[in-house]
Image (tube, helix red, strand yellow):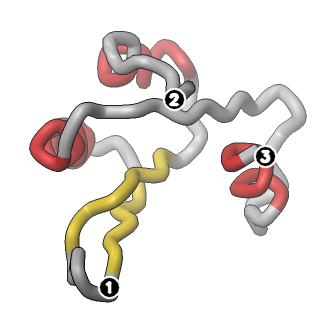
Amino acid sequence: MIAHAAGESSPGNLPKETFAFVLAVPNRDALEGLAAKLAASGIAHARIEEPDAPWSGELMALGVVPARKEGLKKYFSSIPLLR
C-alpha cells in the first residue's frame, strides 16, 4: 500500500506499465551506500531524511525516479522485498 500511495500521489502521470516496489536494507550504512552508488551512477533519486528528533537529518528512505528495469536491476536485485 505504501508504493500505491506514492504512485497515486505522484504528479508525474506515470504510465500504467510502471511497477513499484519497496525494499528493505539492514541498516543506515547500507542505505547511505546505496544512495552513494545511485548518485555516482547518475540515477535520479530522492533522499528522504527525517527532520525531527531523535533522527534529526538521518536518511530514512530513497525514492528512485521511474526508469527501465534493466538500468536499475544491478542496484536493487540483491536487496530483499519489504515483508
Q: Which residue is mark 2?
A: 82
Which percent across, then down, holds residue 78?
32, 12
Amino acid type, label 2: Leu
| SS at mark 2 in the image | loop
In the rendered image, the quadrant that contains the C terminus is: top right
Which percent across, then down, holds residue 35?
23, 46
**Residue 5 higher or lower than 66, as above or below:** below
Q: Nearer the viewer, residue 7 or 60?
A: 60
Calculate the distance from the C-alpha at mark 2 to the C-alpha at mark 1: 23 Å
Q: Which residue is mark 3?
A: 4
**Residue 57 higher or lower than 68, as above or below:** below
Amino acid type, label 3: His
Which percent across, then down, holds residue 80?
42, 18
Residue plotted at (75% across, 32% down): 18
| SS at mark 1 in the image | loop
| SS at mark 3 in the image | helix
Instruction: Choose top left, top right, bottom left or bottom right for residue 76.
Output: top left
Answer few, some or many: residues within 10 Å of disc 1's Cα (few below 14, many 20 plus, some between 14 and 19).
few
**Residue 22 higher or lower than 73, as above or below:** below
Residue plotted at (55% across, 19% down): 69
Amino acid type, label 1: Pro
Calculate the distance from the C-alpha at mark 2 to the C-alpha at mark 3: 14 Å
Q: Which residue is mark 1?
A: 51
In this rendering, would 27 be left or right of 19? left
In this rendering, would 26 be left or right of 64? left
Answer few, some or many: residues within 10 Å of disc 2's Cα (few below 14, many 20 plus, some between 14 and 19).
few
